[in-house]
Amino acid sequence: MKKSIIKSTGMFVPPNVITNHDLEKMIDTSDEWIKQRTGIEQRYWIDGETGASDLGFEASKIALENAGWTAQDLDFIIFATLSPDIMFPGSGCLLQAKLGLDSTPALDIRQQCTGFLYGLATADAYIKSGLASKILLVGGEVHSSGLDKTTRGRDITVIFGDGAAAVCIEGVETDKQAGVLSSALHADGNLASALMTELPASRLPIRLPRDISLDDPRYFPVMDGPAIFKKAVRMLPKVIKESLEKAQISLDEIDLIIPHQANMRINQALGQFLKLDDNKIFHNIQKYGNTTAASIPIALHEAMEQGLIGKSGDVVLFTGLGAGLTWGSVIYKFL
Ligand code: UT7
C-alpha cells in the first residue's frame, strides 16, 4: 500500500519583527507578563499588503525546491488557514494561481490551530485512496491585520504572529512501517464562542452594516483564554493516547512531540503530565508567537533543520487544540 511520505518542508515569515517591547508602546502590557504567561519574546507581522497565500507562496517555493519538484508535479493542494486573503475564493486557489497552475485542485480547510493536523490526515486519505500522489500542504496565517491593537484586545494581540510553512507529501509504495501511522481528530462546536471572530457574519441580515465601528469587539478575535488553556491541558494527553493506541506504538517510541505553539506553559504542562524529558517536546513559540495553522509545520521545518528528526525510522507526534474547538494528534514515521 502507498504510504504518505514527507519529502520536504519550507517556511516563511514576513521580515517585520515585533518584540514584546514594541507591544508595550502600543498597549498596556509588559515584556515580563508576556514571557511569563506565554513564553513569547517576539513575533513577525506583515508590513503592507500581504495575504496568507503570499506567505504560503514563499514557503511553497522553498518546499518544492527542497523536494526537487516543480509546481506542475503537484496533483493536489491543501491550504489551512483561519485568515484567508479575502472572504472568497479560498487562499488555496490564490496560491495555486501564484504557483503558475490553472487546473490543479486546491482545497481550503478552516480548522484554525489544528489545520495542519486535519490537512495531514486529509492528504494521507487522498494518497491511500489513490486520489492523489504528490500533495502540497500549506499552513499560512496573517493575524496582524485583524487584531485589536488596543488594551482591550491585549490577551490575544500579544500571542498571535504571521507566518507560513509548506510540506510536500508523496505517496510511496513500500512495505515498511512509515508515513502517517495514525491520526485522531476531534471537534466540539458547542465551544465555538470560546475563541472566535464573529464579524462580518453572513448569518446577519446585513453582513456589513453601513456604520461599521471598530469599537465593536465582534470585529476582532475574542478568547476565553483560561478555559481553552484548561481544555488543552485536559484533552491533549487523551488524544495523544488515542493516536498511540491507533498506531499500536508506545510513547517511548516517539522521538519528538511537536505540539501546536499556543502557549509555552501548555506544552510544559503536557510534558510534565506525560513525564517526558524537556528535549522530547519542541518549542519555538518564543520566536514566532502563535501562528495557528502555520505553527506545527513551521516547528516541523525547524526541528528537521536542527537535525532533531528526519532520519529513517524517526517517529514524530504532532498535536494541538484550538478554535472550533478542534483538537487532534497525528503520528508520522520517517521512511
Ligand atoms: O491557539 C489557539 C488556542 N489558544 C490557546 O491555547 C490559548 C490558551 N490560553 C492562554 O494561553 C492564556 O489564557 C493567555 C496567555 C491568553 C492569558 O494568560 P492567563 O494566565 O490565562 O491570564 P488571564 O486571562 O487569566 O488574565 C490574568 C490577568 C488579567 O488581569 P486581572 O483581571 O487579573 O487584573 C488580565 O487582564 O492578566 C491580564 N492580562 C494582561 N496583562 C498584561 C491579559 N492579557 C494581558 C497582557 N498584558 N497582554
Image (tube, rainbow, N blue to C red):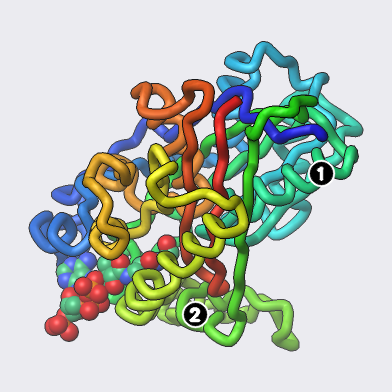
- First reached walking from the N terminus: tag 2 or tag 1: 1
Amino acid type at image mark 2: Arg
Q: Residues within 10 Å of mark 1 (few under 14, many from 20)?
A: some
Q: Is mark 2 within 8 Å of ligand 1?
A: no
Q: Secondary structure at mark 2?
A: helix
Q: Name the residue rendered at 23%, 46% in the picture.
A: 277
Picture quadrant of ligand 1: bottom left
Point out residue 323 in the picture as x, y percentages from the top left corner. 51, 69
Report crowding for label 2: few under 14, some 14 to 19, many 20 or more residues within 10 A (C-alpha).
some
Instruction: Give me the C-alpha separation between circle 2 and circle 1.
Output: 37 Å
In the displayed structure, 177 sits above or below 153; it is above
Q: Quadrant of the C terminus?
A: top right
Q: Which residue is mark 1?
A: 126
- Please provide percent x and percent y for residue 160: 37, 55
Residue 58 shows in the view: no
Image x and y of residue 331, in percent: 55, 46
What SS does tag 1 mark? helix
In the image, farthest residue toward the left: 32
Looking at this view, is 182 or 285 the one in front? Answer: 182
Residue depicted at 55% across the width and 27% down the height: 9
* Horizontal side of residue 155 vs 333, given as left or right: left
Amino acid found under the numbered disc labelled 1: Tyr
Residue 116 pos. (x, y %): 58, 49
**Residue to which mark 2 is pinned:** 218
Per the rendering, the mark at residue 176 is none
Q: How many marks?
A: 2
Where does the N terminus fall, quadrant-wise? Answer: top right
Give the side of residue 207 with respect to residue 225, left or right: right
Q: Is residue 163 left or right of residue 89?
A: left
